[in-house]
Amino acid sequence: MQIENIIAEIKNILEMLGGSITEERTVSMKPEIWGKIDASRLRDFFLLVCERIGIPHLTTIIGEDLGDRIHIMYPLDFYDESQGDKCLYFVLSVEIPKEEPKVKSISDILRVAWIYEAEVSEILGVQFEGLKKEGRYYIPDTIPEGIIMRKDKQDIVEKYLNKAPHPLEGGGND
Amino acid sequence: MIEDKEFIRIPIGPIHPALEEPFKVTIVTDGEEIVDVDVRFGYNYRGLEWIAQRRNFINVMYMAERVCGICSFAHTYAYAITVENLIGQEIPERAKYIRAIVAELERIHSHLLITAVMAHNAGFDTWFMRLMQLREKTMDMLELITGNRVNYAIMTIGGVRRDIGDKEKRMLTEYVDYMQRKVLPEIIDLFMYNKTIENRFIGAGILSKEDARAYSVVGPVLRGSGIDHDIRRDFPYDAYGSLDFEVITPKKILGNVRGDSYDRTLVRIFEIVESLKIIEESLERLPSGPIHGKQMIPLPITLKRLSGRSIGRVEAPRGELLHYILAGNSEGPIRWKVRTPTEANAYALKVMLKGDQIADAPVTIASIDPCISCCDRITIIDTNTGEKYEKTFDELLRLKSER
């Protein structure tokens, strides 16, 4: 599929799901588009993208604490497979309330999402519904899960920084 | 992960005192065959992103340089691009080419390192020493240009900190010539036409094109599976938009794609050829002029006024490296995020190792060029008897040779 058609298709899908384009710019001589969507329609977006355009390249999942809410971004690369250097960078954003930080997992749609969802859940305490995860993946066992990048929980982080056990005294991972 | 008692779990890693990025790969085996794999990070968690929220933009540049010892320039490059995108600053042409030269020298020394490790895996220890000697020569070039062997400290927001003079240019030209004429033909000959290498690498850790896409792997691992993507060409930054180089895939070298450890190794070797071409071309086209942009407002003041979001990506030696910054009129970033290539590639070991023999594991793990060599210690636990015994990396290699 040509890049112009991919852009049009993404806009269609976003419109259909009640999302919108927030910014369009050119970076590194290539189109870079930022869009947002309601968290409840996130899975629908990825299902439709995989069905209509193909599997995108998910670079990472970025989570950030914006004070009253949590902002999650999914940067995606789309390529025109007939011409490898024709490509589009698209960043999809969702926002979820801080009181109940829940969003549906996309790890069954894009397998690589598992590691990035695991990271966001461990540093920000976001619950990815449907994410099959046992134990820790990113952060050490000595730091409680879901607090390190949360602005409202920095007092707990400071406490652990000062009192984290030395690896020879029972600290560290399994 | 499979928990059946009849299987044996083999934890590979995670800790070795000399390592920078330890991680653990737990393999579940049925006899000699690997049936499941689990990957775990977090053994050397330094909380860099957390610390960055308490530092200013200039401090974070120094931190970025210390994320990784091998690809330290790639991290400063991605960080500088991210900040420059926010400022909207165009950097001088000469600085763009100097950045490309340093980035490619770093790629060469990183690729030579992993190629040396792969030669060692195949039992060619003489070649391991030879390749490490060549890497040393490459690091001498980096020292010549930057003054440092590891954390080069040449990158700065808006340009570079050191220029390339006539003496450096002449020595770099001699280095490129020596590598192209004397060294690369030997390396290519060894890796392409040697039966032992073929026997040990071909078929180990196959990653199909479909899996490479599903696991969003990056760099030589992605290209080794036949996907023709490279950030330098696809999203060109700085001088790369005007430089002539080829994106290497096994199809271009061998005419077919298997997606195994052999393909990944060959991709890296031929990328060294392309990197040398880039350095040669950059030296020829190196324009005169300043190496740092002049600013009407001092940089620290400009940085304090930054606001917005920016993503910067570069092609590090191991693949696409991403830096993200959220700025909001503050001393430093509100959020700084780094996604290293190994994060993406290591998770794909789940599919690459499955179905392989235990003895293939060291070759496959090394073939993704993780920023670690922590699999030098393996403990095998028999879940039926609870008995533990250890196998060293060398013993595994011997098993591989005997197979």
Image: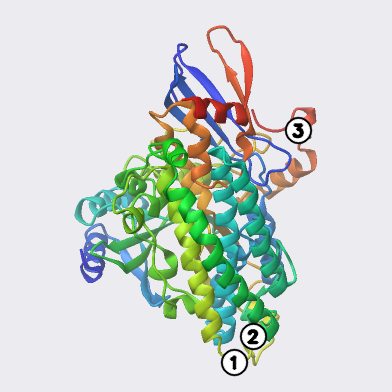
Tell whether B46 sits left or right of B319. Answer: right
* Horizontal and vertical percent position of residue A89: 37, 66
* Horizontal and vertical percent position of residue B301: 68, 82
Residue A140 seen anywhere in this rendered image of the structure: yes
Q: Dot 1, how many residues are within 10 Å of its Cα: few (below 14), some (14-19), or many (20+)?
A: few
- Front residue of A116/B112: it is B112
The residue that mark 3 highlights is A167
Q: Could you tell me if the residues under marks 3 and 1 are in contact, i.e. CB atoms within 8 Å?
A: no
Which label belongs to residue B89? none
The residue that mark 1 highlights is B288
Q: Nearer the viewer, mark 2 or mark 1?
A: 1
User: Within the image, what quadrant is residue B15 found in?
Assistant: top right
The residue that mark 2 highlights is B292
Tell whether B317 sits left or right of A173. Answer: left
Q: Residue furthest top?
A: B385
The residue shown at (69%, 79%) is B161
Q: Is residue B29 above or below residue B315?
A: above
Q: Dot 3, how many residues are within 10 Å of its Cα: few (below 14), some (14-19), or many (20+)?
A: few
Residue B79 seen anywhere in this rendered image of the structure: no
Look at label 1 and name its amino acid: Ser
Q: Quadrant of the N terminus of chain B?
A: top left
Look at label 2 and name its amino acid: His
| Cα distance in 3D space between marks 3 and 1 | 54 Å
